[in-house]
Amino acid sequence: MPGAFKTSADLIAQTLRNLGVLAPGQDIDVEDTSVVQALLDPVVRKLAALEIVAVTDVDNIPGEWFADLADILAGECATSFGSTPDDFVKLVNKGLGGAGGIPVGAGTAAMSLKIMTRNRPTYETLRTYSF
């Protein structure tokens, strides 16, 4: 299947599109890329810590996670790009959540990722107790 995996450059470009910073056909500005790139690792770590999804390699992002990760990253970068308060709330709640009464981890994209990854094997050792 073509496009089964996406790269961090693809994720950054989609995040900038979601923020309305990048118009179709426009070249990506280096400064905008660096702002999103700086937040990419902390956001990936945050998603793992919240047990939403564990992205092990940002240059091999599964295609089914791509749009949700771009929404989450856009919400986390919204203040850096001067979003209005209304747009900020919309972007954050579409992504990870945590604004306007929505708890962190209950945003649209976060819930979608949780649904996609639930009941999957973790390959962790299962401890058992015999009586």
Image (cartoon, grey):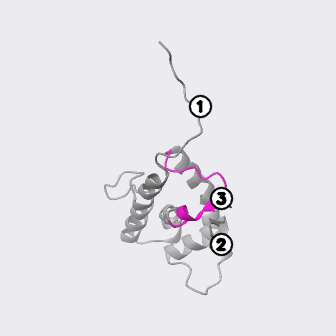
- The residue under the point 61% across, 87% down is 25
Which residue, given by chain and number where applicable, does mark 2 sit on?
A: 31
- Mark 3–mark 1 Cα distance, whole angstroms, equals 26 Å
Location of the N terminus (image quadrant): bottom right
Which tag is nearer the camera, tag 3 or tag 1? 1
Q: Can you name the residue that lies furthest to the bottom here? A: 25
- The residue under the point 50% across, 73% down is 19
Which residue, given by chain and number where applicable, does mark 1 sit on?
A: 125
Comparing 117 with 73, the one in front is 117
Q: Position of residue 118 (x, y in %)?
A: 46, 48
- Mark 1–mark 2 Cα distance, whole angstroms, equals 44 Å
Comparing 22 with 105, the one in front is 105
Earlier in the chain: of badge 1 and badge 2, it is 2
Residues in magenta, as a range: 50-67
* Label 3 element class: loop
Earlier in the chain: of badge 3 and badge 1, it is 3
